[in-house]
Image (spheres, rainbow, N blue to C red):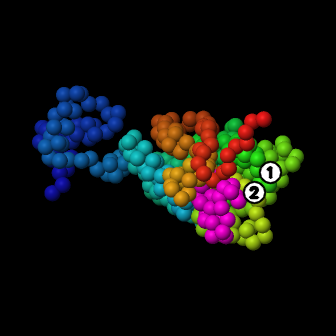
């Protein structure tokens, strides 16, 4: 039989409420009483039932971890880091797949049914309305990888995607590429729009540089490969900024199948620096997104909001950097 709170109380010779206070964060209990209860609990192998306790505390410690791009391998890393960081704080992640979801209200209803204490929307492609919908229902929310705004409606943690686009353009121009191309993810995604904006701004500073635009159906290997195979039928640019590493790897596959060489025939730069980008045979030059720091900051924010739900929304941006590998030709020598 699984030991109960009553069993612990009888063994320790204390009241049931004393046992309950011992295992309730912030509850008043003397050190002597706590030691006696913990000793009895250890001897019996008792573990508190957090779900049962939530009926009285009205706190489940469940955090909805919401995303919609489960086809992108980088989210294996993202979910691993998120779940571990939440569990280390005594919080319990509830993973929710919103692929193909278009109605923010339906998402709110789903999470409300589970009585979550807060929500982390881990997506750069879901519209900002999804995060705002949770806030409007008074559910603490953080939008990780969300779109930067100087006065955001909800807490946003991520990178400056416009600056990431500028960085990619500067890197390609510094290597002598002049016929450039942007191959982004879904055109309606804010991350795609912002990366494209920065890319075009930087290229526009050099009159002799040209740029062509195309968009993949999703941030996935197959979508990147499919779009590149289409482009190769009518010619190709000298170098491509692919709005995501997994797109880049799909593009790399299509180029090689066409009998072309990277970087001798075509250059590629990605974004994210996912683990796969460094694998032998891929060795993708990319822009590093500090995912671990972004996730740590997101968990810190959601935990703070559980204590202070009225905390004023803020945007936290983390800098990116280029990781040099083997899919771009060397930089031009300084004159």
- Residue drawn at (65%, 58%) of the image: 262
Residue 97: x %, y % from top left:
52, 61
Q: Residue furthest top?
A: 31
Q: Quadrant of the N terminus?
A: bottom left
Residue 178, label in figure: 1
Relative to residue 123, is residue 46 drawn left or right?
A: left
Number of labelled discs? 2
- Start and end of the magenta stretch? 245-270
Q: Are marks 2 and 1 in contact (CB under 8 Å)?
A: yes
Question: Magenta segment: does it hold 95?
Answer: no
Image position, residue 324 (x, y; %): 60, 45
Specify the quadrant that holds the C terminus. Answer: top right
Q: Nearer the viewer, residue 14 or 69?
A: 69
In this rendering, the answer to whether 261 lies above or below 284 is: below
Residue 81 in the image: above or below residue 261? above
Vertical order, 48 against 335 (above or below):
below
Q: Out of 128 and 186, give the one closest to the viewer.
A: 186
Left or right for 83, reference 291: left
Kindly identify which numbered label has been placed on residue 70.
none
Q: Quadrant of residue 212?
A: bottom right
Whether residue 191 is visible to the viewer of this picture, yes or no, is no
Observer able to see residue 230? yes
For disc 1, the neighbor class at 10 Å (few under 14, some 14 to 19, many from 20) is some
Q: Which mark is residue 238?
A: 2
Task: Examine the image and state in which quarter residue 27 appears.
Answer: top left
Q: Nearer the viewer, residue 102 or 224?
A: 224
Q: Earlier in the sequence, mark 2 or mark 1?
A: 1
- Residue pictured at 67% horizontal, 42% vertical: 160
């Amino acid at each position: 039989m699984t030991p109960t709170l009553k069993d612990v109380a009888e063994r320790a010779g204390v009241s049931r409420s004393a046992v309950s206070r011992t295992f309730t964060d912030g509850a008043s209990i003397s050190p002597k009483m706590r030691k006696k209860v913990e000793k009895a609990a250890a001897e019996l192998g008792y573990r508190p039932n957090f779900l049962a306790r939530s009926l009285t505390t009205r706190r489940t410690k469940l955090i909805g971890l919401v995303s919609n791009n489960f086809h992108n391998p980088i989210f294996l890393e993202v979910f691993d880091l998120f779940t571990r960081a939440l569990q280390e704080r005594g919080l319990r992640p509830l993973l929710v797949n919103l692929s193909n979801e278009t109605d923010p209200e339906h998402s709110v209803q789903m999470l409300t049914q589970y009585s979550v204490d807060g929500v982390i929307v881990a997506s750069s492609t879901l519209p900002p309305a999804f995060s705002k919908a949770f806030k409007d229902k008074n559910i603490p929310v953080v939008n990780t990888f969300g779109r930067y705004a100087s006065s955001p409606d909800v807490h946003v943690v991520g990178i400056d995607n416009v600056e990431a686009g500028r960085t990619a353009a500067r890197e390609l121009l510094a290597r002598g590429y002049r016929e450039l191309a942007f191959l982004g993810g879904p055109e309606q995604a804010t991350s795609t729009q912002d990366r494209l904006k920065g890319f075009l701004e930087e290229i526009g500073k050099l009159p002799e540089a040209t740029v062509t635009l195309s968009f993949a159906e999703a941030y996935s290997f197959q979508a990147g490969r499919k779009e590149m195979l289409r482009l190769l039928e009518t010619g190709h640019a000298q170098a491509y900024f692919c709005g995501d590493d997994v797109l880049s790897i799909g593009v790399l596959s299509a180029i090689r199948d066409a009998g072309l060489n990277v970087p001798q025939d075509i250059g590629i730069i990605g974004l994210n620096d996912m683990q796969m980008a460094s694998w032998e045979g891929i060795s993708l030059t990319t822009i590093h997104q500090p995912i671990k720091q972004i996730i740590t900051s997101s968990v810190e924010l959601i935990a703070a909001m559980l204590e202070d739900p009225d905390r004023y929304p803020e945007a936290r941006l983390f800098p990116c950097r280029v990781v040099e590998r083997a899919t771009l030709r060397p930089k031009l020598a300084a004159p």
